[in-house]
Image (cartoon, rainbow, N blue to C red):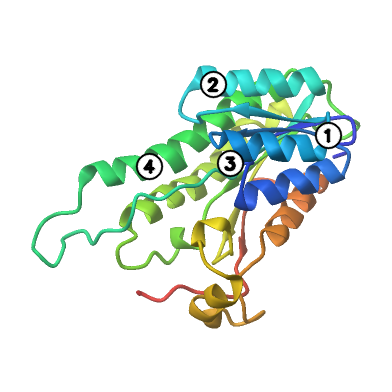
């Protein structure tokens, strides 16, 4: 799918995987909406990349907010790409702690709300907007790329909430792709392993020594640019649909 005369919406676009994706898509001539809650970072990135990249403060759990971001994208060009790369953390908890107390239910709800419900909200609204596009020569009107995690398959101790939310994104992928076949909108998911992002709040060397050593090859953490490169390929390759792609250097999480 050609995106040189299209727009993209990237949630979490102000940092980490999202920022790398914004840069990659903008570099291909696509107009991009940075949809995030980090105002300073989002505005600075938009200013750096130019007029066809704009920042829109966006809460993925607020439908009106997402609609505003979609409208901003459609003002730039037909919306053909939506990437759900938003993140966040509310800590980790064993299902029953060492003190015998159960994990907080609110923590589970927080993860499911952000990663699963927020992803679904952007998916449904973005796909509806894409359905209004004129189809290209392949009948394609757009693609949505969601972000799962290898924790969806091998969740570690303390990750019940995060793993369940990301497993929901995995389970969403195929039926959503099937739902949208008549619209010509594809749905894909990427399941990253351990990627170095600003969330680690430490030097890359220290992070690689702590987490990259477990990655078989390349023996390091992933770079956000590698995630963005995969998103770019998914967008370009019309035959990728309804699938979850692991991007993890052959890493398989151990229990802890």
* Residue plotted at (50% across, 62% down): 200
Label 2 crowd (10 A; few <14 / some 14-19 / many >=20): some
Q: Marks 4 and 3, Cα distance to the nearest angstrom?
A: 16 Å
In front of the other: label 1 or label 4?
1
* Left or right relative to 96: residue 48: right
* Left or right relative to 22: residue 254: left
Q: Secondary structure at mark 3?
A: loop
Residue 109 in percent (x, y) is at 30, 40
Name the residue tied to disc 3.
12
Name the residue tied to disc 4.
112
Q: Can residue 189 be seen in this snapshot?
A: no
Q: Marks 2 and 3, Cα distance to the nearest angstrom?
A: 14 Å
In front of the other: label 4 or label 2?
2
Q: Marks 1 and 4, Cα distance to the nearest angstrom?
A: 35 Å
Q: Choose top left, top right, bottom left or bottom right for residue 205.
A: bottom right
Q: Secondary structure at mark 1?
A: loop
**Which numbered disc, 2 or 3, marks the residue that appears first in the sequence?**
3
Residue 247 in percent (x, y) is at 63, 64
Q: Secondary structure at mark 4?
A: helix
**Which numbered disc, 4 or 3, marks the residue that appears first in the sequence?**
3
**Which numbered disc, 4 or 2, marks the residue that appears first in the sequence?**
2
Label 1 crowd (10 A; few <14 / some 14-19 / many >=20): few
Name the residue tied to disc 2.
65
Name the residue tied to disc 1.
50
Q: 162 and 241: which one is in front?
A: 162
């Amino acid at each position: 799918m050609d995106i040189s005369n299209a727009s993209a919406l990237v949630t979490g676009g102000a940092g980490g995987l999202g920022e790398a994706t914004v840069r990659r898509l903008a570099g291909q001539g696509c107009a991009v909406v940075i949809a995030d809650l980090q105002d300073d970072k989002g505005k600075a990135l938009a200013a750096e990349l130019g007029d066809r990249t704009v920042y829109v403060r966006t809460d993925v759990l607020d439908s009106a907010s997402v609609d505003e971001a979609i409208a901003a994208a459609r003002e730039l060009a037909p919306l053909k790409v939506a990437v759900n790369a938003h993140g966040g953390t509310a800590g980790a908890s064993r299902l029953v702690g060492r003190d015998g107390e159960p994990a907080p239910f609110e923590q589970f709800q927080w993860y499911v709300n952000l990663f699963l419900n927020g992803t679904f909200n952007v998916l449904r609204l973005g796909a509806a907007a894409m359905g209004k596009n004129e189809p290209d020569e392949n009948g394609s009107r757009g693609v949505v790329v969601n972000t799962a995690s290898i924790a969806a398959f091998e969740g570690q101790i303390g990750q019940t909430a995060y793993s369940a939310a990301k497993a929901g994104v995995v389970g969403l992928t195929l039926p959503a792709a099937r739902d949208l076949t008549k619209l010509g909108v594809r749905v894909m998911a990427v399941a990253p392993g351990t990627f170095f992002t600003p969330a680690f709040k430490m030097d890359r060397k220290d992070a690689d020594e702590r987490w990259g050593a477990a990655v078989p090859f390349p023996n390091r953490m992933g770079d956000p640019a590698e995630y963005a490169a995969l998103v770019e390929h998914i967008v370009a390759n019309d035959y990728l649909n309804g699938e979850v792609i692991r991007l993890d250097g052959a890493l398989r999480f151990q229990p802890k």
